[in-house]
């Protein structure tokens, strides 16, 4: 059986790669150091767009894997073991470099399971979580209605876009952080 590549999936992968690169380019941090409001707004706008990079990769994986009904043992054997090995190996390399090639196995294991020795591998932990939930997500998606999708998308939009923008504007125009403003509203009730 010949597998046909879906060109739109490949185009989305290219876009996701571009966004990862864009977010990691040092010139992108230029907007952080500019004091005027226009540059800060531009930074927030570009940052919001660029942050879809890893979630886009997860969505691509979801669109390709949610059509397959696999058991946990199959997912572990075919996919998870590779990610676990990558986490262990790359965290070990970073651990060795940071500790002058002296190994404390207990500290290494605790570091890997606590929050990773090198936090730049967070996406591997995230992908592991996605793979762990894959059979459950498969069942949810099979029974999901379009209205359920729009509700979930709206909730995500509020907490990933509206709330960070509110934090920025409260800090910029009211001169206080968002958490202290929330405490003031709680005290008034």
Image: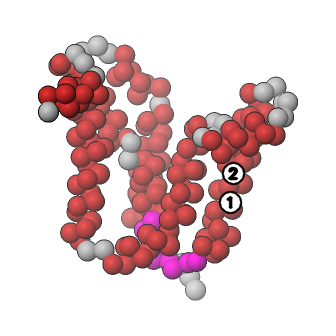
Q: Quadrant of residue 22?
A: top left
- Residue found 60% across the figure and 40% down from its top: 115
- Residue found 26% across the figure and 74% down from its top: 145
In x, y percent, where is residue 168?
A: 25, 27
Foreground residue, 80 or 52? 80
In terms of secondary structure, what is the magenta stretch mainly? loop
- Residue found 25% across the figure and 68% down from its top: 148
Residue 187 lies left or right of residue 26; in this view the side is: left
Which mark is drawn over residue 86? Answer: 2
Query: Does the magenta portion include 124?
Result: no
Q: Which residue lies furthest to the right in this view?
A: 102
Magenta stretch bounds: 62-71
Residue 128 lies left or right of residue 13; in this view the side is: right
Spatial CA distance of label 1 from label 2 is 6 Å
Q: Is mark 1 on a helix, strand or loop?
A: helix
In x, y percent, where is residue 167?
A: 26, 30
Q: Which residue lies furthest to the left in this view?
A: 188
Residue 181 visible: yes
Residue 81 lies left or right of residue 24; in this view the side is: right
On screen, 109 above or below 164? below
In x, y percent, where is residue 78?
A: 65, 70
Residue 64 visible: no
Which mark is drawn over residue 82? Answer: 1
Q: Is mark 2 on a helix, strand or loop?
A: helix
Q: Quadrant of residue 75?
A: bottom right
Can you say which quadrant of the picture contains the C terminus?
A: top left
Query: Does the magenta portion include 68?
Result: yes
Q: Are marks 1 and 2 in contact (CB under 8 Å)?
A: yes
Residue 56 lies left or right of residue 68; in this view the side is: left
On screen, 127 above or below 93? below
């Amino acid at each position: 059986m010949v597998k046909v590549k879906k060109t739109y999936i490949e185009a989305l992968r290219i876009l996701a790669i571009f966004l990862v690169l864009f977010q990691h380019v040092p010139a992108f941090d230029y907007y952080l150091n500019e004091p005027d409001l226009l540059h800060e707004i531009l930074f927030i706008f570009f940052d919001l767009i660029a942050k879809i990079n890893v979630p886009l990769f997860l969505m691509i994986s979801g669109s390709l894997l949610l059509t397959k009904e696999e058991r946990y043992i199959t997912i572990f054997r075919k996919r998870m073991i590779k990610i676990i090995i990558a986490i262990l190996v790359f965290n070990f390399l970073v651990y060795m470099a940071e500790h002058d090639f002296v190994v404390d196995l207990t500290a290494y294991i605790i570091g890997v399971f606590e929050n990773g020795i090198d936090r730049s591998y967070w996406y591997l932990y995230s992908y592991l979580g996605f793979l762990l939930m894959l059979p459950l997500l498969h069942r949810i998606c099979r029974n999901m209605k379009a209205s359920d999708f729009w509700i979930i998308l709206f909730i995500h939009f509020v907490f990933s876009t509206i709330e960070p923008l509110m934090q920025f504007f409260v800090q910029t125009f009211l001169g206080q952080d968002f958490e202290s403003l929330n405490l003031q509203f709680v005290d008034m009730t």
